[in-house]
Image (tube, helix red, strand yellow):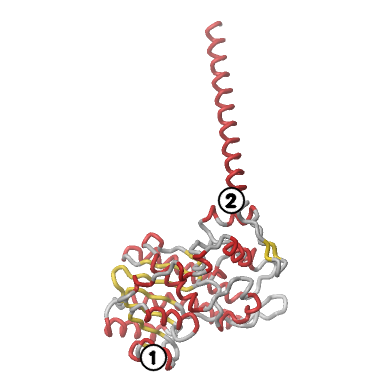
Amino acid sequence: DFLLYHQALGIIVDVMVSFVTRTFAVAAVALFDKTFAFSTLSKGTAFHTSSKVSTKMSNNDFDETRGGTHSMADQVKRFAKAKEDDNRRFLDISSVYDGKDLSGKRVLVTGGNRGLGFELSKELVGIGATVIVLCRSSCTEIEQLVGKYNVYSGIDVTDTEAVEKAAKKVKSDGGALDVVINNAGYFYDPCEKILDNSLNFDEQLKQINICALGPLRVNSALVNAGALAPDAKLAIITSQAGSAEWRSTQNANDGSDYGHHMSRAACNIAGVLQAEELRSKGFTVILLHPGFNRTEMTKKYSHIWDIEGAVEPKEGAKRVLHEVINAKFEDSGKFVNCEDGLQIPW
């Protein structure tokens, strides 16, 4: 009986020690988490007085950034935080951008005859890259910039046959491409809503065809034409509008612009699938939100250009190229915000 008593007592003591140890461990972890969160959040206090919109970081803001690996959903707070932190990467891309790694490279840009695409082409030529532009209609400026024979006009990314012919011509004209920038896009201007019966299904399909199937057509045609270098990078210009998670912040209690958001979400999943399929070939596929640029495509939002930090397209082009240059093979399939270089959630 005495032996059994001591055995039972030993078991009870072991259980109590284990319980106390685990309790203290949990408490310590919780205390660390709160201390870390507080120290991080205490650095994020700012208010955008001109708009009456608070830019103070909340616990939800901290959670959504995944500890600093992801960009912030609230565009006003994102820009305000960059100014508060004097984030030069965000505020002045020229302070970190160096395009020399693209010098001598062969780069194809779709939709390169205007807006962001034109500025991408211009910057690439300026750093010594050979630029091939695919566009629906040419113009004197782009022909003078990249050379008339490097402008493939009459190419609509919704026309599979035309895209495949262009890919074969790219291959026969000058060899393999080092970089492809799928920039061609389309944004239906009127705001679509269910409640005012303004949905335009034809326009929605058009946006999906251009913005989601367009890059898929182009990349597929180039791969099958053998027009890519062994370690080619395939960049897809998409949008934060394709993030389902961010709709509850950026479109809270609103919805709207169905075609735009659906086309970008479809573009994103197509990009991830391409990244997975083409991984075995050594190609890197990256999905890039170019940031907020002051172009014709975003003119309907010109009233918020200033508060959300919209930049001129020449700056937006450098942001995009900075991400292209720094993208590594292991980054294939990531969805990145070119404003701050952080990821965007799906």
- Give the residue type at disc 2: Thr
Which label was assigned to residue 301?
none
The answer to whether residue 63 is above or below residue 340 is above
Q: In this view, does 192 lie to the left or right of 292?
A: right
Mark 1 residue element: helix
Residue indicated by mark 1: 143
* Residue sitting at the far bottom: 140
Q: Residue at x 55, y 81 (%)?
A: 295
Which image quadrant is residue 305 in? bottom right
Q: Residue at x 66, y 61 (%)?
A: 55
Instruction: Please name whichever residue, 230 or 265, is drawn nearer the observer in this view of the structure.
Output: 230
Identify the image quadrant of the N terminus: top right
- Give the residue type at disc 1: Glu
Label 1 crowding class (10 Å Cα cut-off): few <14, some 14-19, many 20+?
some
State the separation of the CA atoms marked 1 and 2: 50 Å
Of the numbered discs 1 and 2, the one sitting upstream in the chain is 2
Which image quadrant is residue 6 in? top right
Q: Which residue is drawn at 51% across and 79% down?
A: 313
